[in-house]
Amino acid sequence: SYALLSSRGKSHIVNQDRAVFISPFLLEVLLSSSSSSSSSSTTKATTPTSFLSAIFDGHGKLGHTVAQEVVERFPVILAEKLTIALRSPPADGDVDNNTGMKGGNHSIYKSNSEEHENVISIEDYDSTDFAIRKALNETFLEVNDNGTASTFSLGGCTASVSLRWGSKLYMANAGDSQIIIVSSFMPSSSSQLSSSINQQQQRTPE
């Protein structure tokens, strides 16, 4: 479940915020990549979880129009890139033109655009981490570079994106918007609940 609360800024006629929550997100791709990576494991696997959550805060005269275009295009472009990257991993020695990865021994990935000097070292991540980080990075760049010129010249938007992929949570942002993670748990006993309440009361100033 999820909830969204947004309000119009005092200096704007319309609310320029846009948000999207998709759950599950590319579940078939997640199940496929999870089964292939854990095929040799003998432990009982649980059903993996996935979701995409994104908030775009528009600014400028046409910020609301920019945010609307981005909220519609971002999930589609990211889904396309993740599907290509994760459905068909490269064989040893072969270079995958879609992911920029070489099977077996991976090198580095550099953006094709000369304007962006992004370098991600595959040695720092496993192949799935690499593919997801690369897909997020490229999606941000593609949405920004290929936006409607007449609209993007009169507005813009920040982006705060969270992608749950199995047991991992990936976050990416552009602009001055921030992501806050809050975790919670259900106490297993009444004594544990009482202890939690007492600790909270001790922290609360009178």
Image (tube, rainbow, N blue to C red):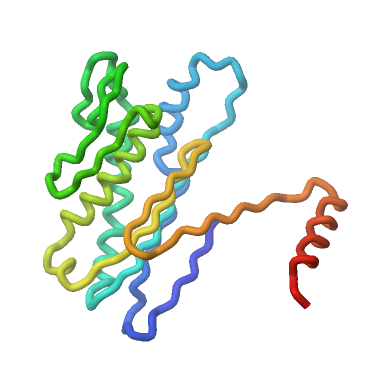
Q: How many marks?
A: 0
The image quadrant that residue 90 belongs to is top left
Residue 11 in percent (x, y) is at 33, 85
> Residue sitting at 29 percent across and 57 percent down?
72
The reply, left or right, for residue 178 in relation to residue 146 is: right
Q: Is residue 38 above or below residue 145?
A: above
> Residue sitting at 22 percent across and 17 percent down?
94
Say whether residue 52 is visible: no
Q: Quadrant of the C terminus?
A: bottom right
Front residue of 82 and 201: 201
Q: Is residue 14 above or below residue 121?
A: below
> Residue sitting at 36 percent across and 65 percent down?
176
> Residue sitting at 18 percent across and 59 percent down?
147
Say whether residue 123 is visible: yes
The image quadrant that residue 85 belongs to is top left
Residue 151 in percent (x, y) is at 17, 68
The image quadrant that residue 96 belongs to is top left
The reply, left or right, for residue 81 in relation to residue 194 is: left
Residue 36 in percent (x, y) is at 43, 21
Residue 1 in percent (x, y) is at 56, 55
The reply, left or right, for residue 49 in relation to residue 99 is: right
